[in-house]
Amino acid sequence: MSTAEFGSLTLLLFVVIASAQLLGYLFQRMRQPKVIGEILAGVLLGPSLLGHFAPRISQAIFAGSGPVGQKYELILSFLYNLGLLLLMFCSGAEVKGLFKKRDRREVTWLASVGTAVPFLLVIAAYKFIPLEKLATPNAPRMSVLLIVGIAASVTSIPVISRILHDLKILHTRFASLILGVAVIEDIVLWAVLAVATALISTNGVQTGHVLRHVIAALVYFGIGMTIAPVLLRWITRARWNILVHASPVGYVTVVLLAYSAIAAAFDVSLVFAAFLAGYGLIGELETLAPAVESLKTFSFATFIPIYFAIVGYRLDLSKTFSFSMLAIFMGLACLLKLLSAGLGARLARFNWYDSLNLAIATNARGGPGIVLASVAYDAGIINAAFYTTLVLTAILTSQAAGAWLEYILRSGKPLLTASVEELPVKVADPEQLAA
């Protein structure tokens, strides 16, 4: 990359980061989740608006589809994935006591009923779903049906964790329950998605490959929750560990990269790796707290806004868009998810108020919903109209969840009435919430 190319790249990053921060701040002032503003910044800069109405300006910023534009696309892809890893790492480091014994029954009910019921209802209603209107001409019906089922039942880890962080409740039991459910749901998501993509690529399920993928994910997750934190604690406290004393921030970064590299070697999602890396350091936060906080501060100022801005940038509303498809799918998907998650919460013995808060929070589809849409669209399973529908559903449900939780906290009510950890977060004015 020449000096001139690098200079224009700095302009691109300036525009992306500044837009994401500005719109994120404005959304906070409007009592909306900051993350939605960051996604909207990408929509404004992307082909939906700037690329459609001012293509020359877009060409000047993003360098188009030529060799330079391809370099920038590669760099933005790297920053996108790095931002996602850092977001999940920060979430894992803040979620103290995830999957505590007292929460296992509640998480099990919420995850099993809240995920299984909408997914199975979609599968059972396949005769009434116009799959041909959602799919590409050659896509197997089963692949499309699996995608619809996943989209109706998934909960977002990245977006809901960002919302919980912005509301300063990521340390609470409510957050632990939501993220615990989301982690379990996403394990199921990747397993079913592997089946759906295998169907369209081979016209049949490669049972051995799918089974190995699922087992690897489960084993990695199990080790990451049990053995790895103990091993990491021993390594951190070892006398021969020079790096932890010479550069605590460097050591924390190395831990994140090591978890990610091991996950990649076993074909496990790096989202889980980053989350478990942060979770593994919880026992050493008294020692490494300043290092984790430094990494977190810089990540939420730069890389994480880039991640969400690129999510919005990749959304092209100028392509085929069906308002009726969006309204019908989002309405039915939200209804299924809210009723199922609410039922799971009631079976877990939460009262109606707590069940409502838990159901609305788990209805945020966010990142996994967008990833699902992208993978299915790139694999040729769904058409452009349904792709746009899935992405907008992910964004709108996340905004609704964030707005509801912010409203509850601002009104001075607890999110969980049964837990003393959920005492209301007093917010005097919007300035305090935005801080």
Image (spheres, rainbow, N blue to C red):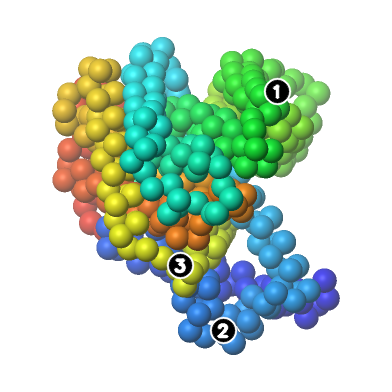
Residue type highlighted by circle 2: Pro
* The N terminus lies in quadrant: bottom right
Which residue appears at 62% of the width and 69% of the height? 13
The circle drawn on residue 208 is 1
How crowded is the residue under tag 2: few (<14 C-alpha within 10 Å), some, or many (20+)?
some
Tell me residue 335's x, y (percent).
26, 40
Camera-side residue of 335 and 25 = 335
- Confirm whether residue 415 shows in the render: no
| Figure check: 322 above or below 256 | below
| Figure check: 346 above or below 415 | above
**Horizontal relation, residue 281 to residue 368: left or right:** right
Camera-side residue of 401 and 397 = 397
The residue indicated by pointer 2 is: 55
Tell me residue 162's x, y (percent).
44, 46
| Spatial separation of the CA atoms under disc 3 and disc 2 | 19 Å
How crowded is the residue under tag 3: few (<14 C-alpha within 10 Å), some, or many (20+)?
few
Residue type highlighted by circle 3: Thr
Q: Secondary structure at mark 1?
A: helix
Which residue appears at 54% of the width and 32% of the height? 192
Say which label, 3 or 2, has the lower sequence index. Answer: 2
**Horizontal relation, residue 92 to residue 346: left or right:** right
Verify CB contact (< 8 Å) between mark 1 and mark 3: no
| Spatial separation of the CA atoms under disc 1 and disc 3 | 37 Å
Residue type highlighted by circle 1: Gly
| Spatial separation of the CA atoms under disc 1 and disc 2 | 47 Å
Which label sits in the foreground, 3 or 2? Answer: 3
How crowded is the residue under tag 1: few (<14 C-alpha within 10 Å), some, or many (20+)?
few
Q: Secondary structure at mark 2?
A: helix
Camera-side residue of 428 and 254 = 254
The circle drawn on residue 52 is none
The residue indicated by pointer 3 is: 320
**Horizontal relation, residue 31 to residue 169: left or right:** left
